[in-house]
Image (cartoon, grey):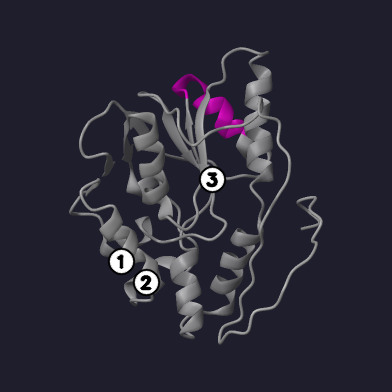
Amino acid sequence: MDEAGCAVVGGHSVRDEELKFGYAVTGLIDPRRIWRNVGAKPGDALLFTKALGTGVLATALKQGHTNERDAQASADSMARLNRDACAALRKIENDMGGGATPIHAVTDVTGFSLLGHAREMAMGSGVSMEINHTKLKFLPGAREAARAGDLPGGIKNIREWLEGCVGIAAEIPSDIKHLLFDPQTSGGLLIAIAPESLTAAREALTENNVEALSIGRVLGGTLPLLRVI
């Protein structure tokens, strides 16, 4: 909270079998300096800024199936703010000198999974998306946890919710298929950006110590809405 510049006020206690906590966040923003989760355009490149797998690793941890190294890597990923990524994107905009922004849509990937949040962006923008599974990165131990069956219940719910929206190539390994639907906690940013700004964006993100994964592209309104190759 200190790192994010937040003040923690108020609160109340809950008696429950599992340890949990949550926050309601309030604050002020400049409405002239926001990115929406809609507005992606055909031809845009898709960038993603974190590895996937926090959901399955949390489930594996509850079952005692993960090791300290993998659990710590997941915790470190969740604890990292998206602020550095945002600062890099702002640099790209500032370098445009007030021209039209090349950043057309941005969303954080959280409990609806990568594909769930991609669906929201695609539907709201009137486009479809193609994601290349070989370009994705997974947290240490995440694929092993998925193969071992340490799957959060949310994966099944998200699969059912996205039924009919997603086409996944048959040859993609089953553990990666699970991780595409894995609900994330404090996941990365999914960014639709004009292709001519892709290299500059990746360089700016890398300079801010953010791994920039170029995972796919935005297409015209074709079916299925999301295609994973």
Q: Earlier in the sequence, mark 1 or mark 3?
A: 3
Mark toward the viewer: 2 or 3: 2
Choose top left, top right, bottom left or bottom right for residue 119: top left
Q: Amino acid at mark 3?
A: Thr
Q: Position of residue 76 (x, y in %)?
A: 64, 63
Q: Is residue 216 visible?
A: no
The residue pinned by badge 1 equals 156
**Residue 195 lies in the magenta stretch:** yes
**Residue 196 lies in the magenta stretch:** yes
Q: Amino acid at mark 1?
A: Lys
> Which residue is situated farthest in the left direction here?
170
Q: Is residue 129 left or right of residue 50?
A: left
Q: Report the front residue among 141 and 86.
A: 86
Q: Is residue 31 visible?
A: yes
Q: Position of residue 1 (x, y in %)?
A: 76, 58
Q: Is residue 32 left or right of residue 46?
A: right
Q: Which mark is residue 153?
A: 2
The residue pinned by badge 3 equals 49
In the rendered view of the protein, which quadrant contains the C terminus? top left
Query: Residue shown at 62%/44% (left/top)?
Result: 210
Label 3 crowd bin: few (<14), some (14–19), many (20+), radius 10 Å: many
Describe the element under mark 1 as helix, strand or loop: helix
Magenta region = 194-204
Choose top left, top right, bottom left or bottom right for residue 181: bottom left
Describe the element under mark 3 as helix, strand or loop: loop
Tell me the CA gap for discs 1 and 3. Answer: 25 Å
Mark toward the viewer: 1 or 3: 1
* Callouts 2 and 1 close, C-beta under 8 Å: yes
**Secondary structure character of the magenta stretch overall:** helix
Numbered marks: total = 3
